[in-house]
Image (tube, grey):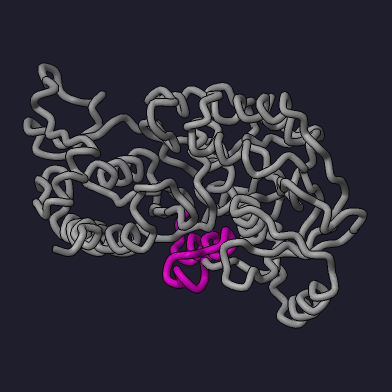
Amino acid sequence: MRQLIKPHGSDSLNPLYVEDDTKRAELLKEAEGLPKLLICSQAAANAVMLGCGYFNPLTGYMNLEDSLSVAEGMKTSSGLFWPVPIVNVVEDFSEIQDAKRIALLDPNVDGNTVVAIQDVESIDEATDEQMKFMAEKIFATTDMEHPGLKNFLTVGRFFVAGPIQVLSYSYFVAEFPETFRTAVQIREMIEKNGWSKVVAFQTRNPMHRAHEALVKIAMDRVGAGGAVIHMLLGKLKKGDIPADVRNACIRKMVELYFEPNTCEITGYGFDMLYAGPREAVLHAVFRQNMGASHLIVGRDHAGVGDYYGAFDAQELFKEIPNGALELKIFEADHAAFSKVVGDVIMMREAPEGHSKEDFVFLSGTKVRAMLSAGKELPSEVARPEVAKILIDYYQSLLPEE
């Protein structure tokens, strides 16, 4: 069997979670006597991703110099290709002033338990101009209504940099025991399945027939042994489908409509950035780290609202320097059910003479309205078993009469 794709930036994966129980207990004991810093949700998610090995080969949080360099040119000051700053930014560092080693407290867990210990190498203050510069480069907008940009510009301006030792996977293991997996675990899963080529599919939404078809088309085109559906389990914007509902939908779809042993369902602990093309490239980095050879990049990948063009993410991948990533992308087009073909196809591959009216389309707004009203979705759009789960969820949101 061919060896799996190498991790990004190193020959082997270096997750920062302290696996040894005795060592971890010692560090948790040490943390009791260290200065404490309650970090923001994004910084806690970054710690989890570092702990899982997804952000290999990073050893901790970036300083301001690296953050500016990554924002501007997608590489650290040492030349490592990286698309988005991985930072611990705070508004107030008075509790850790002059400290060389600190305990990071998790804002997403009751009691704010310790998620990691950090060696503080520097605390840099960014100017307003530097914060705005980074935000515009990362999110391609200056609009404060953009959820990711707003979050980036309101958590603080002090960059607490340095390596970390991760002591917890936050709430993800407890809440998503069937689904949450580290990059290490997914590599082991892929090797156990005997897959050399692996397609990764990113999702923060339930999967409908178009998504199902894109995964199957990509597997066929690249000759993959299997697919890993890798769903985001962290914080989303208001109105997005909760992770537990999404998880149930995807599991039902794979159970009924994929060949056995061709698809694994997993998830990762991260807060969505909604950074469009830049976040798509970050997705590629950590999918390479988990062992995927290909990532499906489709329409408005990691986007929100109308901030990005439909295929801006695919265009950004064309600008990446040769050799920066080993993982390849599968460029997916918008997909829909064709009444002519009798199946879901990518629109660019529609047969000659095919018109827009020959496709079955429903907008997201229309889908949500139908589900809220308890109406079944057309079978050309959603599998009925998946639609039933979503109807039950939307019905549960309605006020009791």
Could you tell whether 283 is left or right of 83 in the image? left
The residue sitting at 35% across, 47% down in the picture is: 239
Q: Is residue 330 visible?
A: no
Image position of 268 with respect to 351: above or below: below
Could you tell whether 359 is left or right of 183 in the image? left
The number of callouts visible is 0
Image position of 256 with respect to 85: above or below: below
Where, quadrant-wise, is the C terminus in this rendering? bottom left
Residue 12, percent across and down? 69, 55
Q: Is residue 117 visible?
A: yes
Could you tell whether 13 is left or right of 178 in the image? right
Residue 173: say if magenta: yes
Residue 177, percent across and down? 46, 72
**Residue 137 vs residue 5, the one in the foreground:** 137
The residue sitting at 57% across, 47% down in the picture is: 286
Residue 285, percent across and down? 58, 42
The residue sitting at 39% across, 59% down in the picture is: 243
How would you classify the magenta stretch by its main secondary structure? helix
Which picture quadrant has residue 95? bottom right
The residue sitting at 45% across, 68% down in the picture is: 176
Residue 36, percent across and down? 78, 64
**Residue 361 vs residue 95, the one in the foreground:** 95
Residue 316: say if magenta: no
Give the extent of the magenta segment: 172-195
Which picture quadrant has residue 139? top right
The residue at the far top in this view is: 353
**Residue 55 vs residue 395, the one in the foreground:** 395
